[in-house]
Amino acid sequence: MSPDFEHGFTELKGRASFRPQVRIYLFTEGRPPITALFPALPDYEMVLARSRDELVFLRKMSMESEAQFRRECRRVAEIVAPLVVPDCHLHCAYDNAAGRTGFAVELQKTGASAAFVETDAAAGRKE
């Protein structure tokens, strides 16, 4: 995660009330196709990063379990996969009501694959 986003997120965590959310970071070679991604994920807010190779999707929602979180990450990955170039990856994180990251997973799309696959060896561990 870029230092600017980490700083901004740390400030958000310090606030009294925090709504649970899913954060998904898309890292690509070159600018992601924003005009194609925006209508494909209407339930997410899109935030442009300072890096032209990064795009952030935010959705305020509660997760009951890690399995539910993983289903949401896979759903987004399936929507995004045909719209982005090979050799990119997604970092998905769930922030609970306390503002702490409860779940996280990494997904990679390589030149040999049309879909994202999970790559985080420690997937599911609490940060």
Image (cartoon, rainbow, N blue to C red):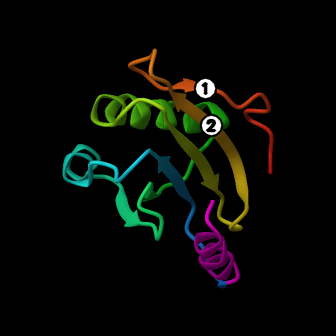
Judge the density around disc 2: few (<14), some (14-19), many (≥20) Cα neighbours within 10 Å. many
Q: Which residue occupies 45% across, 59% down?
A: 58
Spot occupied by residue 33 in the image (x, y as percentages of width and height):
27, 48
Residue underneath mark 2: 106
Amino acid under label 2? Answer: Glu
User: Is 61 placed above or below 121 here?
Assistant: below
Left or right, residue 85 beside residue 93: left
Question: Which residues are the magenta region?
Answer: 1-14
Residue 5 painted magenta: yes
Residue 87 painted magenta: no
Which secondary structure class fits the magenta region best? Answer: helix
Q: Which residue occupies 66% across, 84% down?
A: 16
Residue at the outermost front position: 30
Mark 1 or 2 closer to N-term?
2
Callout 1 secondary element: strand
User: Is 20 placed above or below 10 here?
Assistant: above
Judge the density around disc 1: few (<14), some (14-19), many (≥20) Cα neighbours within 10 Å. some
Spot occupied by residue 60 in the image (x, y as percentages of width and height):
46, 60
Given residues 126 and 79, the one toward you in this image is 79
Amino acid under label 1? Answer: Glu
Left or right, residue 18 beside residue 98: left
Left or right, residue 5 beside residue 38: right
* Quarter occupied by residue 119: top right
User: Is 53 placed above or below 19 here?
Assistant: above
Q: Which residue occupies 60% across, 75% down?
A: 4
Given residues 91 and 61, the one toward you in this image is 91
Q: How far, Cα to Cα, is label 1 from label 2?
A: 6 Å
Residue underneath mark 1: 118
Q: Which residue occupies 73% across, 33% down?
A: 123
Left or right, residue 38 beside residue 102: left
Q: Are marks 1 and 2 in contact (CB under 8 Å)?
A: yes
Given residues 18 and 22, the one toward you in this image is 22
